[in-house]
Image: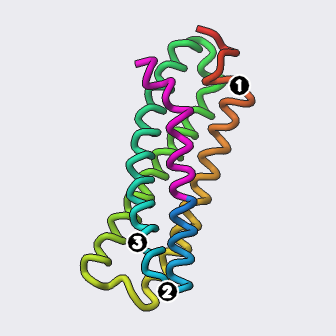
């Protein structure tokens, strides 16, 4: 499973970019009343959820590998790893819930009027969750060297 753990640093950037792009597409699609931006937002959100699932699954493998490599020193890194994992998982579920809600409203033809404006702060909150997840992930890499060759095997 070391191969899957090695994919985490690559895969993680896709949902970050897709979710932030979703927020901009959604915001501009609603504010400017552009249907093509709204459709692009929906597709981008769905792609972000799929890629986030891959990032979380490979991140779980990376966490298991880190536990093996660090063994007795896991306690000094463990809280940051656990917080990163918790925020990443929560962010995935958050955007999945946004996708489900948006799908429901589109299918019921209720994604209109003032109700659609709710998705702007929802997207903004999602971007904040991405930021917090990234803070802990960046700490793991840049402070502790996890996921780099600094730790060795």
- Specify the quadrant of the image occupied by residue 121: bottom right
Q: Which residues are magenta?
A: 1-19
Q: Nearer the viewer, residue 104 or 81?
A: 104
Q: Which mark is residue 33?
A: 2
Name the residue: 63% across, 15% down: 73
> Where residue 118 sits in the image (x, y, percent)?
48, 79
Mark earlier in primary sequence (2, 3): 2
Please give the residue where the numbered disc 1 appears in the rendered image: 144
Q: Secondary structure at mark 2?
A: loop
Mark earlier in primary sequence (2, 1): 2
The label nearer to you, 2 versus 1, is: 2
Crowding at label 3, few (<14), some or many (≥20) Cα neighbours within 10 Å? some
In the picture, measured across the screen, residue 11 lies left or right of residue 127, that is left
Dominant SS of magenta comes to helix
Q: Which mark is residue 39?
A: 3
Q: CA distance from mark 2 to mark 1?
A: 46 Å
In the picture, measured across the screen, residue 23 lies left or right of residue 140, that is left
Q: CA distance from mark 2 to mark 3?
A: 11 Å
Does 95 sit above or below residue 62?
A: below
Name the residue: 57% across, 68% down: 24
Does 141 sit above or below residue 90?
A: above
Question: Which quadrant of the figure contains the C terminus?
Answer: top right
> Where residue 152 sits in the image (x, y, percent)?
63, 10
């Amino acid at each position: 499973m070391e191969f899957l753990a090695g994919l985490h640093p690559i895969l993680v950037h896709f949902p970050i970019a897709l979710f932030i792009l979703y927020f901009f597409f959604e915001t501009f699609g609603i504010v400017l009343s552009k249907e093509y931006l709204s459709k692009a937002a929906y597709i981008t959100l769905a792609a972000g959820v799929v890629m986030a699932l891959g990032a979380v699954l490979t991140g779980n493998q990376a966490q298991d590998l880190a536990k093996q490599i660090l063994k007795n020193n896991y306690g000094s890194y463990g809280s940051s790893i656990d917080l990163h994992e918790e925020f990443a998982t929560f962010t995935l579920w958050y955007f999945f819930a946004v996708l489900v809600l948006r799908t429901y409203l589109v299918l019921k033809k209720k994604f209109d009027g003032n109700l659609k404006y709710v998705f702007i702060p929802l997207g903004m909150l999602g971007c904040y969750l991405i930021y917090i997840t990234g803070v802990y992930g960046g700490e793991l890499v840049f402070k502790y060297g996890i996921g780099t060759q600094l730790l060795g095997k």
